[in-house]
Each structure stands twice: as C-alpha cells, then as structure tokens.
Image (cartoon, rainbow, N blue to C red):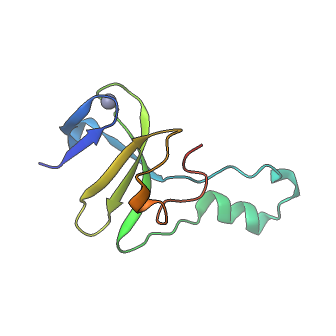
Amino acid sequence: MLQINCPFCGTRAEIEFTCGGEGGIVRPLNAEAMSDTEWGDYVFMRKNPKGLQHEQWRHASGCGRWFNALRHTVSYRFEATWKIGEHPPAEFAAIVNEGAAQ
Ligand SMILES: [Zn+2]
C-alpha cells in the first residue's frame, strides 16, 4: 500500500488522504477584469505533466489539514511533502508552482 507522509502526523496509509489537484494555483486578484477565456484557463486548465507534479493533498481521515506534495505522476512516488506556508525542499524549488508557499 502506498504510504504518504503527512507533515503534521507522519507517515500514514494512502486511504486516509484525498488529492486536491494541482498545487500552488493562486486566485487572480483582478478576476473582474479577466476575459471569459482567461477565467476558464484559471478554473479548468492544469499542467498534467508526465513526471513530478506539485499537488495539494488533505489528510481527510487524520488531522484534516491540507498540505503540499511533490508526486511523480507515473510511479506515484511522493518525493516531498510540506506544510502550507512553508517553502518546499530546496532541491525541488524549480518544480513547484509559483505561489505554493503562500
Ligand atoms: Zn495529518
């Protein structure tokens, strides 16, 4: 079974977690000025890479908190997890979406 490291509780079984999709997506400050196409891109368009991806996960059956994760989309291997508001491990900073540490 896949094990995920909750940055608050420690390593737990995958079944305790839910994935919240791509991480680090910041809501636009000028939403009223955006075109329908720009708004649609913000709401629906995601990177979906083959490889490492920055995601947000929730420890739904544990502490209930959201956190950031860096997961490989082919192997499912979690390379790192970190709390919202913290910076990712330095070796992965270039992969993580802008705004992730906020
Ligand atoms: Zn937890």
View quadrant of ligand 1: top left
* Vertical side of 38 occupied by 8: above or below: above
Could you tell me which quadrant the C terminus lies in? top right
* Vertical side of 68 occupied by 83: above or below: above
Observer-nearest of 15 and 78? 78
Residue drawn at (49%, 47%), measured in percent from left and top?
87
x then y, percent, for residue 96? 49, 59
Residue 7 located left or right of residue 43: left
Q: Quadrant of residue 4?
A: top left
Residue 24 located left or right of residue 49: right
x then y, percent, for residue 81? 35, 46
Q: Quadrant of residue 75?
A: bottom left
x then y, percent, for residue 65? 42, 30
Outermost residue, bottom side: 50
Observer-nearest of 88 and 49? 88
Residue drawn at (69%, 63%), measured in percent from left and top?
40
* Vertical side of 16 occupied by 71: above or below: below
Outermost residue, front side: 90
Residue drawn at (33%, 51%), measured in percent from left and top?
80
Q: How many numbered callouts? A: 0
Outermost residue, left side: 1
Outermost residue, right side: 33
x then y, percent, for residue 44? 59, 61
